[in-house]
Image (cartoon, rainbow, N blue to C red):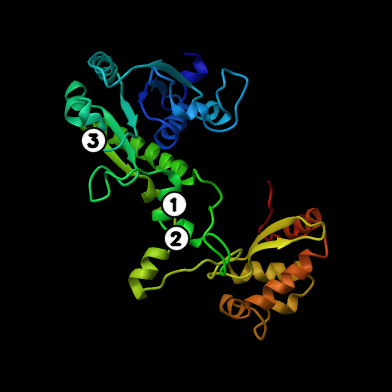
Amino acid sequence: MTDSESELPLAGVRILDVATFVAAPFASTILSEFGAEVIKVENPKGGDPWRHYGTKTERDGDTLAWMTESRNKTSVTLDLRTSEGAEILKRLVKVSDVMCENFRPGTLERWGLGWDVLSAVNPGLVLLRVSGYGQYGPYKDRPGFARIAQAFGGLTYLAGMPDGPPVTPGSTSLADYTSGLYGALGILLALKSRDATSEGQVIDMALYESIFRFLDELVPAYAKDGTIRQREGMGTKLACPHGHFQTGDDKWVSIACTSDKMFERLSRVMGKPELSEPDMYETTAQRIMSREIVDGLVTKFTRSYSQAEVLQKCNDGEVPCGAINS
């Protein structure tokens, strides 16, 4: 370990990554970036399937996706379905702080590697378990991938135009990455708890949970009065103007006026300060009621300039505006 590596906050923490594909491995990737040592355990017959998913590279056919999420890791191969492989894993568990896995619930138990066994080997072990629907409950045996989690968690329903079908919300792997973030956070909290108790614990992470948590006020709004938000296309029902607008050079910008103050600034940038006066569109409620008119005025402004010019004008006027990049 170099001096710079030893200064990282997670230096000295050892993680066993026995997971495949994205969510749990992404959690260990994040922690590796802050100094944790990660031992990647792969199946001897072909390795992690993630090696072959995505854009191929010249390095033994490994993909860009694999190389991105396997960096900072030392790979070993173990067949955990054999008694020899299971025993070797136990020896690794004994000298590790964390283990990450994302097999179907019950799989580790069938291999003789359940929490009762692992915690007996190392009482201080933190075990991250990622699955489609969690380790318990009526759906625990269902297979799950990120696309399914995004659908089940409610995000896919919101993606698309109001008069169209639900579409992929940007990435089919989004739930994997959000779950990985929550998984990394859970590991850190468990390690902090272990400092006080000397005891490890299990983190039970369902893929859909991270998506469900990211949906702002949808759950309390439904609990309050049964409101079910529908697809809103490029805007949002909570603010206006707050969406995507085409520029004169056929590019796009994103503008977000989440407050009356922001719209006042945009009005000045557009050369129409009167738009933010009380008898016009001063308040969010007024603008939402006249959404088509307000969005039309903003579109007329953005279509009059190139993307670069719109960005410059908005930035000079302290209006939140960004290029929509590929």
* Residue that appears at 32% across and 27% down: 98
- Residue matched to label 2: 216
Q: Answer with mark 2 or mark 1, whichever residue precedes in sequence.
A: 1
Where residue 271 sits, quadrant-wise, is bottom right
Question: Residue 213 vs residue 62: left or right?
Answer: left
Residue 36 image label: none
Q: Dot 3, crowdedness within 10 Å: few (<14), some or many (≥20)?
A: some
Question: Residue 56 vs residue 210: left or right?
Answer: right
User: Whole-Å distance between the Cαs marked 2 and 1?
Assistant: 15 Å
Nearer the observer, disc 2 or disc 3?
3
Question: Residue 253 vs residue 215: left or right?
Answer: right
Q: Answer with mark 2 or mark 3, whichever residue precedes in sequence.
A: 3
Check the image and report above or below for 248 versus 111.
Answer: below
Please provide percent x and percent y for residue 272: 77, 75
Amino acid type at circle 2 is Asp
Total residue callouts: 3
Q: Do the residues under discs 1 and 3 have CB atoms within 8 angstroms?
A: no
Amino acid type at circle 1 is Gln
- Residue matched to label 1: 150
Q: 38 or 55, which lies in front?
A: 55
Q: Dot 1, crowdedness within 10 Å: few (<14), some or many (≥20)?
A: many
Amino acid type at circle 3 is Gly
Badge 1 element:
helix
Please provide percent x and percent y for residue 57: 61, 24
Residue at the farthest bottom position: 279
Badge 2 element:
loop
User: Whole-Å distance between the Cαs marked 1 and 3?
Assistant: 23 Å
Badge 3 element:
loop
User: Whole-Å distance between the Cαs marked 2 and 3?
Assistant: 33 Å
- Residue matched to label 3: 106
